[in-house]
Image (cartoon, rainbow, N blue to C red):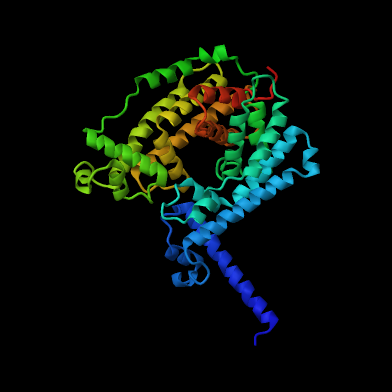
Amino acid sequence: MPSEAATSDTHQQVSARAEEIRAAAGTLFASKGYAATTMNDIGKAAGILPGSVYHHFAAKEAIAIELSEAFHAALLEVALQSRRPERMALPPEERLHQLVTDVATVGRAHAPALGLRVFEAPTVGSERFHAAVNRRPAALYKVWRAVIDEVGALAPDGAMDREMLAYALQGLSVTPGSTAVDNRGVEQTSRTLCDLLLHGVVLDCPDNATLDASAPLAAVKGVIARQVQPDFGDETRTEIITAARHEFARRGYDATTIRDIADAAGVRMGTLYRRIDSKASIFAEIVDNYDDRLDTLLRTALTTQAQSEAETLDALAFGIAHAARQYKDEARMMSLIWNRQQESQDSVRLYLARTQERLQLLSNTLGAGQEEDRIRKLASPDVLAGYVRSIMWNAPRYERSSRRRIHSFIREHLLRGALTTR
């Protein structure tokens, strides 16, 4: 009969191996997406025979459920910690910063669980799987609302959009990589994020009338007025392109099959192949069309001569708000590719290259403003550009907002700062 010590050692070894498998699976879910990951992939990544994975987990779904449950347990602990007397006694702004820091720490520690929520969950998943992946941390949401209400009491009347601020901070704090260029640590990155949305990036920001009359904003509106939808050919081909765009946005490129596209378009496979060559070609066509329109729009905002950096940033925000809504599926598609760093296609490489070029233009704008003491020196220009871009692209994702509301949120929070005296 094995000794208690031997039994304990065996349990520890089994537990350690299970943790190695969870870690390997989590990395694959984050890099490939859940649907594209197999148990064989997980076994190879963990350095064990694929069949041995089944000694620890019945299916990849079981691993996903454990990752999700651990993530939600950590978020619940954040909510409980936020209600401790010593936290409640903090000044409102400091309490908000601490909450952002705690959530950011959890997000970075549980990145695979977040990745499971990026893509639409497979329809074949069990009820338990869907419940675990799509669960929302109700207790933490209540804490967010309470803390932001406390901070909101300090803001000038009409300056703070509490709903959108809560949405922005929840998303930007929990999502790893939103400010990936900042290596200063979670405490500093969280403080910078809060500082930007509460105190703004622009010193002495112009009033709305001045921003409304700016040359960059007029130029961006002109581009929007001239842009038209691309001609995809006949009606059936247009339906196929539209369906493909939506499926790529739902599932990501790797997990979308040509059959998925045909079914979504309501056409036979033969009809589809008479109008497109392959999944890769249809994807490239969508990316190229979106990239051309987006680059023209945002580059116009960044390069049109302005009276101040605030005018450039304001026009950029307007352009992003329009693009994120007008090209919702394409924006979603490319956010998934950006998260996965999938650079296997020429169209994607061009998109990423142009994205970096625009980010450099934004960095140059912020750097020039810092030299003239018109932009706050919260971080170096390249780091600050990452924050500004993340905030501008995050705001349009809030479904209960119009383009006008999004633009107003960027002006009042990111440019001026909600707590700045008007």
Q: Residue at x 29, y 50 (%)?
A: 259
Q: Residue at x 74, y 33 (%)?
A: 92
Given residues 64 and 30, the one toward you in this image is: 64
Q: In this rendering, would 268 be left or right of 387?
A: left
**How far from the left and from the top, in percent, is residue 178?**
55, 41
Q: In this rendering, would 27 be left or right of 421?
A: left
Quarter holding the N terminus is: bottom right
**How far from the left and from the top, in percent, is residue 269?**
23, 48
Q: In this rendering, would 18 be left or right of 86?
A: left
Q: In this rendering, would 174 be left or right of 215?
A: right
* Residue 251 against residue 38 in the figure, above or below: above
Q: Is residue 189 visible?
A: no
Q: Residue at x 52, y 57 (%)?
A: 64
Given residues 406 and 392, the one toward you in this image is: 406
Badge count? 0
* Residue 314 against residue 332 in the figure, above or below: above
Given residues 141 and 179, the one toward you in this image is: 141
Q: Residue furthest bottom?
A: 1
Q: Residue at x 36, y 31 (%)?
A: 292
Q: Quadrant of residue 223?
A: top left
Q: Is residue 193 visible?
A: yes
Q: Quadrant of residue 174?
A: top right
* Residue 172 against residue 8 in the figure, above or below: above
**How far from the left and from the top, in percent, is residue 420?**
69, 22
**How far from the left and from the top, in percent, is residue 202?**
62, 23
